[in-house]
Image (tube, rainbow, N blue to C red):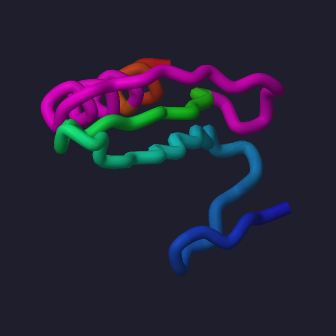
Amino acid sequence: MAAYCGGAMTAKDERTAVLVIRTWIEADDRVRARLTETLDADEPGWDERGAEGEEAILAAVAAWLQAFAER
Protein backbone atom coordinates (compact mmCIF):
# COMPACT_ATOMS: atom_id res chain seq x y z
CA MET A 1 0.00 0.00 0.00
CA ALA A 2 1.38 3.42 -0.92
CA ALA A 3 1.23 6.45 1.35
CA TYR A 4 0.73 10.06 0.27
CA CYS A 5 3.36 12.42 1.63
CA GLY A 6 4.13 15.92 0.39
CA GLY A 7 2.93 15.38 -3.14
CA ALA A 8 4.76 12.09 -3.69
CA MET A 9 3.71 8.50 -3.35
CA THR A 10 6.01 6.30 -1.30
CA ALA A 11 6.03 2.54 -1.10
CA LYS A 12 5.25 0.99 2.27
CA ASP A 13 8.57 -0.86 2.26
CA GLU A 14 10.53 2.41 2.32
CA ARG A 15 12.00 3.44 5.64
CA THR A 16 10.03 6.14 7.41
CA ALA A 17 10.98 8.06 10.53
CA VAL A 18 9.03 10.70 12.44
CA LEU A 19 10.20 13.72 14.42
CA VAL A 20 7.76 16.03 16.19
CA ILE A 21 9.17 19.24 17.67
CA ARG A 22 7.21 21.24 20.24
CA THR A 23 8.84 24.60 20.95
CA TRP A 24 8.06 27.41 23.35
CA ILE A 25 9.61 30.53 24.83
CA GLU A 26 10.17 30.61 28.58
CA ALA A 27 9.40 33.72 30.67
CA ASP A 28 13.10 34.63 30.58
CA ASP A 29 13.13 34.45 26.73
CA ARG A 30 14.90 31.07 26.54
CA VAL A 31 13.70 28.90 23.66
CA ARG A 32 13.04 25.29 24.60
CA ALA A 33 11.90 22.23 22.69
CA ARG A 34 10.63 18.74 23.31
CA LEU A 35 11.50 16.33 20.52
CA THR A 36 9.36 13.22 20.18
CA GLU A 37 10.93 10.83 17.73
CA THR A 38 11.12 7.40 16.20
CA LEU A 39 13.61 6.10 13.68
CA ASP A 40 11.11 3.52 12.39
CA ALA A 41 7.49 4.57 12.06
CA ASP A 42 6.44 0.92 11.68
CA GLU A 43 7.76 -0.03 15.13
CA PRO A 44 5.96 0.80 18.37
CA GLY A 45 7.49 3.22 20.82
CA TRP A 46 8.71 6.78 20.79
CA ASP A 47 11.67 8.49 22.42
CA GLU A 48 11.51 11.97 23.91
CA ARG A 49 14.24 14.44 24.68
CA GLY A 50 14.45 18.08 25.57
CA ALA A 51 16.73 20.79 24.29
CA GLU A 52 17.31 24.39 25.28
CA GLY A 53 18.57 27.07 22.92
CA GLU A 54 18.56 27.24 19.15
CA GLU A 55 21.94 25.53 18.72
CA ALA A 56 20.99 22.61 20.97
CA ILE A 57 17.65 22.17 19.22
CA LEU A 58 19.28 22.20 15.79
CA ALA A 59 21.95 19.75 17.01
CA ALA A 60 19.24 17.38 18.28
CA VAL A 61 17.47 17.50 14.90
CA ALA A 62 20.77 16.90 13.08
CA ALA A 63 21.58 13.94 15.36
CA TRP A 64 18.16 12.39 14.72
CA LEU A 65 18.51 12.83 10.96
CA GLN A 66 22.01 11.37 10.95
CA ALA A 67 20.88 8.36 13.02
CA PHE A 68 18.05 7.76 10.54
CA ALA A 69 20.35 8.09 7.53
CA GLU A 70 22.81 5.59 9.02
CA ARG A 71 20.19 2.88 9.69
Q: Residue 59: within the magenta?
A: yes
Residue 70: x %, y % from top left: 41, 19
Region in magenta? 40-64
Q: Residue at x 73, y 44 (%)?
A: 13
Q: Which one is in front, 37 or 11?
A: 37
Q: Which one is in front, 49 or 2?
A: 49
49 relative position to 62: left or right: right
71 relative position to 65: left or right: right
Q: Residue 61: within the magenta?
A: yes
Q: Residue at x 53, y 45 (%)?
A: 20
Residue 58: x %, y % from top left: 22, 35
Residue 32: x %, y % from top left: 32, 36
Residue 39: x %, y % from top left: 58, 28
29 relative position to 15: left or right: left
Q: Residue at x 62, y 39 (%)?
A: 15
Q: Which one is in front, 54 or 5?
A: 54
Q: Quadrant of the N terminus?
A: bottom right
28 relative position to 63: left or right: left
Q: Which one is in front, 23 or 7?
A: 23
Q: Which residue reaches farthest front?
A: 27
Total marks drawn? 0
Q: Which residue reaches farthest bottom?
A: 7
Q: Residue at x 61, y 42 (%)?
A: 16
